[in-house]
Image: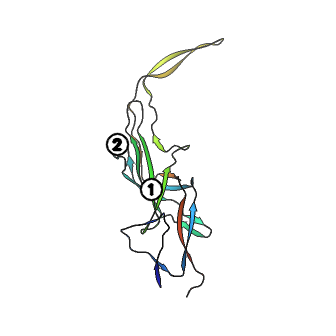
Amino acid sequence: MLSLLTLPANCKKNPNAPDVATQSNEVLTYVTLQKGTRLLCIAETPVHTEFNAVNDPVEARLVHPIYWQDRVLLPASVRLLGSVSQLNQPIAGRDAELGIRFGSLQLSPEVLLPVKAHIDVSDGEQTWGGDLTAGSQWRAVQYNVMGMGTYNRHVDSGPRLMGRHYKVEPGEYWRIVLEEPLTIPIVNRSAFRP
């Protein structure tokens, strides 16, 4: 006898997918990944600050499966679905800035889990770029050191250079960080088969 898979409250069924059926002797267990869990993913969507806009869709795929006890909790085929959350064009003096956030985890073609996550770019930063650009001219500056004398040093001066665009290529590795706990349903198959 078949029964429909019951999803936890935080899951939503993909409206375009067929119903998922499980054997009646299968029971669901829920495993929670804690806030701050890092998932190693690979970019599937190219993103460029010159061509993309805020809210453009972005996809990433899990690189390695995640295991719980002796089971695969999240297979490597799991996709994270998100969007461009911040995009600042380059200006004179600053490079472009790009941020991406994720709102869904596609557990299977039938099941989407809501997720709140961002890409850990470096040292907790959530955006790429935004670096200051150098000045457009070099200038010699004289420094005096008491008891030692003087020396010249070349420094940037003048108006700052125009910033550069930032791009993400498919195949780039990302560390995606969960901002909230994520509960994942897994099917436990009964040891007693009819």
Residue 165 position within the rendered picture, expressed as x and y whole percent measured from the top left: 39, 40
Element marked by disc 1: strand
* Looking at the image, residue 169 lies above or below residue 161: below
Look at the numbered discs 2 and 1 and tell me whether their residues touch, using CB distance below 8 Å. Answer: no
Q: Earlier in the sequence, mark 2 or mark 1?
A: 2
Give the residue at the far left of this rendering.
Answer: 51
| Chosen colour scheme | rainbow
Q: Quadrant of residue 44?
A: bottom left
Q: Is residue 128 left or right of residue 144?
A: left
Q: Nearer the viewer, residue 51 or 191?
A: 191
Give the residue at the far right of this rendering.
Answer: 147
**Which residue sits at x=41%, y=30%?**
93
Element marked by disc 2: loop
**Which residue sits at x=44%, y=49%?**
100
Would you name the residue on which mark 1 appears?
103
Give the residue at the far front of this rendering.
Answer: 9
Residue 38 position within the rendered picture, expressed as x and y whole percent measured from the top left: 55, 54
**Which residue sits at x=64%, y=13%?**
148
Residue 113 position within the rendered picture, expressed as x and y whole percent measured from the top left: 47, 62
Q: Nearer the viewer, residue 45 or 153?
A: 45
* Looking at the image, residue 157 lies above or below residue 168: above
Question: Dot 2 surroundings within 10 Å: few (below 14), some, or many (20 or more)?
Answer: some
Q: Nearer the viewer, residue 182 or 44?
A: 182
**Amino acid type of disc 2?**
Glu
Label 2, label 1: how far apart the Cα atoms are: 24 Å
Q: Quadrant of residue 65?
A: bottom right
* Looking at the image, residue 27 lies above or below residue 151: below
Question: Dot 1 surroundings within 10 Å: few (below 14), some, or many (20 or more)?
Answer: some
Would you name the residue on which mark 2 appears?
50
Q: Which mark is residue 71?
A: none
Q: Is residue 136 left or right of residue 147?
A: left
**Amino acid type of disc 1?**
Gly
